[in-house]
Amino acid sequence: MAGYRIITDSTTDITPEMIEDLGVTVIPMCFMLENQTHRNIPGGGMPIPDFYNKLRAGQTSTTAQIIAEEFIEVFSPVLAEGEDVLYIAFSSGLSGTCQSAFIAKQQLEEQFPGRRVEVFDSLAASMGEGLLVYLAAQQQKAGLTLDQLLEWLKENVLHLCHWFTVDDLNHLKRGGRVSAATALVGTMLGIKPVLHVDDEGHLIPVSKVRGRKQSLDELVRKMAETALDPAGQTVFISHGDCLADAQYVEKRIRETLGVKKFYINFIGPVIGAHSGPGTVALFFLGQHR
């Protein structure tokens, strides 16, 4: 039986150390800033604090999906070595990257008869996608076959909860997530939205909270409502260059839910271009999204 390689993209926002430990391959995505194209390379490229400082100074950033040719370039050597590919994709509700991977799959399975390219839509973003990759890699190490892991992913993907809050509504306004009037009034009143990613992988505003600390506490409250065995799971937290706020959320979850294992990392430029500085996101397994 052929082995298989787990491949994903850099929107997972996992660290180079975790990538190496998990044995996964990460394809960089691109972002544009100051009329230059940059590759979002985990642990390389533009330092993430520099990226956020440019946004704070008024620069805007745009992003681009991975095209089919890039997938073919990465997948082909794996298939040529006799392994199959499991690509865990950035949410199709937020990017066309997943569709590009399906185009590559069709071409490569014709080119490499007998080899498989499986594309799994994570319906997730940032370290939500990263948490799914982390858990999938653990299952692979435990001996699951490709078919068994695909079944595990299907059973668990909609238990992957994303809750986050942003500090600056104007970035969501530019992405069409809130209206200009909502952004203006919310900024004046200190309103902080709480959002999540739904079952279709779309970004959905859920509630509005006045004040930064209250919005961070709301993330903890959302986890307390639905988390499955909180003390026994690994929780991921990502942040838009606001480590102290991410650590505050970690501390509150430790105190209230008994969670012991956390991973905290930056929200990378591909997601950060749309969420902005000061975003804090919480990812865990729950009864439902």
Image (tube, rainbow, N blue to C red):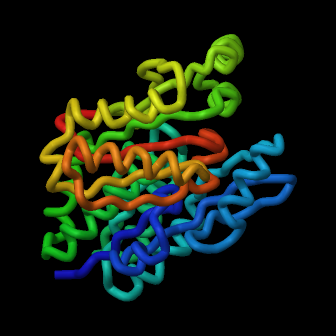
Nearer-the-camera pick, 49 or 258: 258
Instruction: Where is residue 279? Give x, y as percent.
Output: 55, 41
Which quadrant of the figure contains the C terminus?
Answer: top left
24 sits left or right of 16 in the view: left
User: Is 2 positioned to the left or the right of 201 in the image?
Assistant: left
Instruction: Identify the residue shown where x is 40% and y is 44%.
Output: 249
Residue drawn where x is 52% and y is 19% of the image: 210
Picture quarter containing residue 253? top left
Q: Along the horizontal axis of the image, is 59 left or right of 20?
A: right
Q: Give the camera-side residue of 213 and 131.
A: 213
Q: Residue at x 37, y 34 (%)?
A: 219
- Residue 272 in percent (x, y) is at 61, 47
Q: How many marks?
A: 0
In the rendered image, residue 273, in percent from the top left (x then y), is placed at 66, 45
Task: Looking at this view, name the residue that lies furthest to the bottom.
Answer: 81
Q: Position of residue 38 (x, y in %)?
A: 73, 63
Q: Tell me where residue 185 sits by quadrant.
A: top right
